Amino acid sequence: MRLAPSILSADFSQLAVEMKEIESFGADWFHVDVMDGHFVPNMTVGPVVVRSIRARTAAVLDCHLMVKDPVKMIPWFVNAGADVITLHLEALEDPIGAIEAVRRAGKKAGLSIKPSTPVEALTPYLANLDLILIMSVEPGFGGQGFMPESLAKVKWLAQHKRATGASWVIQIDGGINPTTAMAARVAGVENFVAGSAIFSAPDRKKAWNDLMEAIR
Ligand code: DX5
Ligand code: ZN
């Protein structure tokens, strides 16, 4: 079980300081939400920021590309020092080619689906992935409410993983707090992205501990 703090809810004017604080709680993985204003109605950061934080942390940098043309950007994030590159199925014409491009570069490949995409759509790609990200909010913004419908997708994946002995990690992203994290853990989630529940908490250390308690 792993908690993956999403820096989307951090103060970007002092990102390294904020990340060090969360690392002091035990974080060894950061989720970086990349948005281009086309695939989602919001814009965030790109490879320039990933390169800067790469120089400041040894933690895993998990880049979630919510962009219209992810294939073009794979080498940008590879060169910036990403460890995991997660692509949205909805943005890909050739998912297998894109996944292979990530893996050929020596990075872990993730595939994500939005709430409106059925989980069965992942079936052709399950043999070639390191991570599967189930969105439990409409991608674009932090601080939204968890969509409980996403748990059925997680259960389907967990069942498939048990049946086939697959090694990919099931990740969930959106609306994760101690209550929803516990429900997600029961359903089969192994990697929990949490943004506002950590960074916007009045006591971040307590928020971290409460989440860790929920996913243990
Ligand atoms: C939403 C992003 C999430 C976001 C989650 O599009 O993919 O990673 O940061 O934020 P919370 O945890 O606040 O729902
Ligand atoms: Zn994300």
Image (spheres, rainbow, N blue to C red):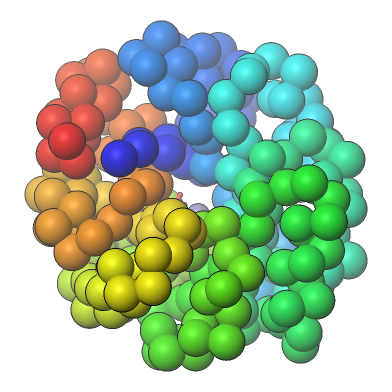
When asked about the image quadrant of residue 60, the answer is: top right
When asked about the image quadrant of residue 162, the answer is: bottom left
Residue 135 in the image: state x and y as whole percent.
41, 67
Can residue 94 be seen in this snapshot? yes
Can residue 74 be seen in this snapshot? no
Residue 11 in the image: state x and y as whole percent.
52, 28
Q: Which residue is located at x 80 percent, y 76 percent?
A: 97
- Asked if residue 150 lies left or right of residue 68, the reply is left
- Asked if residue 180 lies left or right of residue 71, the reply is left
Q: Which residue is located at x 59 percent, y 44 percent?
A: 62
- In this picture, is 112 found above or below 105? below
The N terminus appears in which quarter of the rendering? top left
When asked about the image quadrant of residue 203, the answer is: top left
Q: Which residue is located at x 35 percent, y 37 percent?
A: 3
Closer to the camera, 205 or 154?
154
Closer to the camera, 11 or 85?
85
- In this picture, is 195 found above or below 20? below
The C terminus appears in which quarter of the rendering? top left
- Asked if residue 42 lies left or right of residue 113, the reply is right
Residue 96 in the image: state x and y as whole percent.
73, 78
Closer to the camera, 30 or 106?
106
Q: Which residue is located at x 56 percent, y 57 percent?
A: 130
- Asked if residue 28 lies left or right of residue 110, the reply is left
